[in-house]
Amino acid sequence: MDLIIKNGTVVTDSETFKADIGISNGKIKIIGQDLNGADQIIDATGQYVMPGGLDVHVHLQLPFCGTVSADDFVTGTKAAAAGGITTIVDFAIQSKGNTLTDTVKSRKKEADGKVCVDYSLHGGITDWNDRTKSELKSLVEEGIVSFKMFMIYRSEGWMSSDSMLYQALEETKKLGGTIMVHAESVDVLDYLVEKYHNPVDMKKYGAYCHVLSRPNFVEEEAIQRAIKWTEVTGGRLYIVHMSTGGGANLVIAAKKRGIEVLAETCPQYLLLDDDLFKEKNGHLYGTCPQIKKKEDIDRLWDALGNGEIDSIATDTCTFDTKQKAMWEGDFTKIPFGMPGSELMMPLMYTYGVREGKINLNQFVHYQSTNPAKIFGMYPEKGSLQVGTDADILVFDPRKNVTVDYQHLETNCDWSPYQGWKLKGYPYITILRGKIIAKDGRFTGDIGYGKFIKRKPVVR
Ligand code: URP
Ligand code: ZN
Ligand code: ZN
C-alpha cells in the first residue's frame, strides 16, 4: 500500500469506530485493524479520520458587484484544502446571449490546471429560453446535474422570473437534475433598497441599511414561492444559503408534505448576527442574503440538530478590505460575499459539535456525505468505503487555534472570525491518496484537482 492511517477514530455520517485505513493507487484499499506494510504511515492517535469535506457552494474569481472575487481557483482551493475540504463546487454563470454549454466550457478552462482540490460546477441559469432548455440534457450527461437560478440580482442581469423557475423545475425533473435557488423577493426588496437609499438614512444607519432593507420576510416569501413551484411541477429544489428561521420552518413543512425541497445553510448564518453591521467595519459582513438575528441562528442550529435541513456550505465569495471599501458609505455598493471554505469545518466543530448543537456524525453528514449524495458524487466522494477515492480528513479535536487571517491560505486581508478561538482543526487533508495539506497549510501541487462528473438523481 502507498499509505496507512493508523490508530485513528474513524468517523462517518453514521458510525464512529477505531480502525486503520490502507490506501493504494488513490483509493481506499482496506479498513481494518493493525494494518502494516505501506510506503508511508500517518499516526492518527487521538485524531478523527473522516471523509474529506465538500464545499458545494463557492464563487472563485467571480466577476460580481463591479469587481472580481479575490480568491481565484488557486488560492480558493488551497484554502479549501487547508480547511479539510477535498471537493468544491463552483458555478458557471451564464451571461445573457451565451449558451450554458459554452459557459461551462470556459469556466472549466479557468479552473483546470489551477485547482488544488477536486471540483465540479453548477450551471448558473440567467438566460432561460428554448436554447437553454434544450442544452440541459447534454449538460446532465456531461455531469452538470444542478443549476442555480437567482430570484434577485436584476441589475446584474442574473434574475429569473417565476415562469423561468417553473419551467426549469419542470424540465430538470425529466432529467434527474436539481434547481438551486437564491430565494429573495425581488420586487419588495428593490422597493426597500430604494426606500433606504437616501442620504439621511445612509448617514444615520450606515451599513445597517443593508439589514433594514432585507427583513426576514424577503427571504421567507421567496422560499414559499419556490416551494410552490416545486410542489406543482414535482421538481427537485435546493435552497442555497438559507439564512432565516422562518425559511427553515417552511422547508420542514414542505418536506412533511412530500415535496422534494432541500436546504443549505452557511457558517455565517449560524455564527454571526446583524448587530455587526452597526460596527465601524460592518460593511465587511455584507452578503446576500445578509446575516440575521439570534432567533434565526438558534432555529437554524435546531434544524441541523434535528436533521431537518440538509447541508452546510460556505457561499465563499471573497472580497478584501480594498474591494469592500468600494461602498464609500452607500450600502447598495458593498461587494456581497465573504471568505469561507478554510474555516467551515473547524468553526462547525468548535461551535457546533463542541457546543452540543450537532454531533460528530452529523458534522460529517452535513459537510461531506449528504452534499455528495445530493449532488451526485456519492460514494466516490463523501464516504469512507473500500474502492472509493481516498479523500480523507485527519482532524485533530484537541488543537487550539486563534483565527488570524494572516495565517490563512485565503487571499483575504481580513476574516469575519478574526481572533475567534477554535478547538479542533484539520491536521492532514488527503486527496485521492495524496497529502495536500498539513497543520493548516497547503502542501500539495497546484493543478492536482480534477473535474468530477456528477450523476443525476434516479427517481
Ligand atoms: O453575497 C453573496 N452570497 N455573494 C455570492 C453570490 C450569491 O448570491 O451567492
Ligand atoms: Zn446566491
Ligand atoms: Zn452563492
Image (spheres, rainbow, N blue to C red):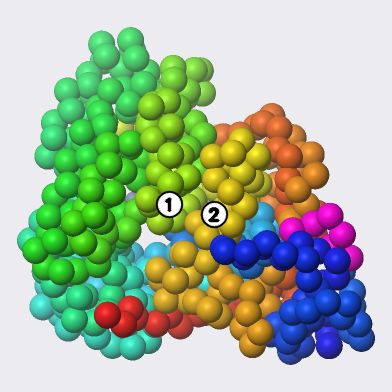
* In this picture, residue 371 sits left or right of residue 66: right
Residue bounds of the magenta highlight: 43-48
Amino acid type indicated by mark 2: Gln
Residue beneath disc 1: 307
Q: Earlier in the sequence, mark 1 or mark 2?
A: 1
For the question of whether residue 95 can be seen, the reply is no
Spot occupied by residue 430 in the image (x, y as percentages of width and height): 72, 70
- Tag 1 and tag 2, C-beta contact below 8 Å: yes
Instruction: State whether residue 18 is above or below residue 296.
Output: below
Which secondary structure is most common in the magenta stretch?
loop
Image quarter of residue 227: bottom left
Query: Could you say whether the residue bearing mark 1 is in a helix, strand or loop?
Result: loop
Identity of the residue drawn at 56% across and 34% down: 416
Instruction: State whether residue 62 is above or below residue 350.
Output: below
Identity of the residue drawn at 75% across and 84% down: 30
Spot occupied by residue 396 in the image (x, y as percentages of width and height): 78, 52
Q: Is mark 2 within 8 Å of ligand 3?
A: no
Disc number for residue 362: 2
Instruction: State whether residue 455 is above or below residue 264.
Output: below
Identity of the residue drawn at 74% across and 79% down: 31
* In this picture, residue 371 sits left or right of residue 347: left
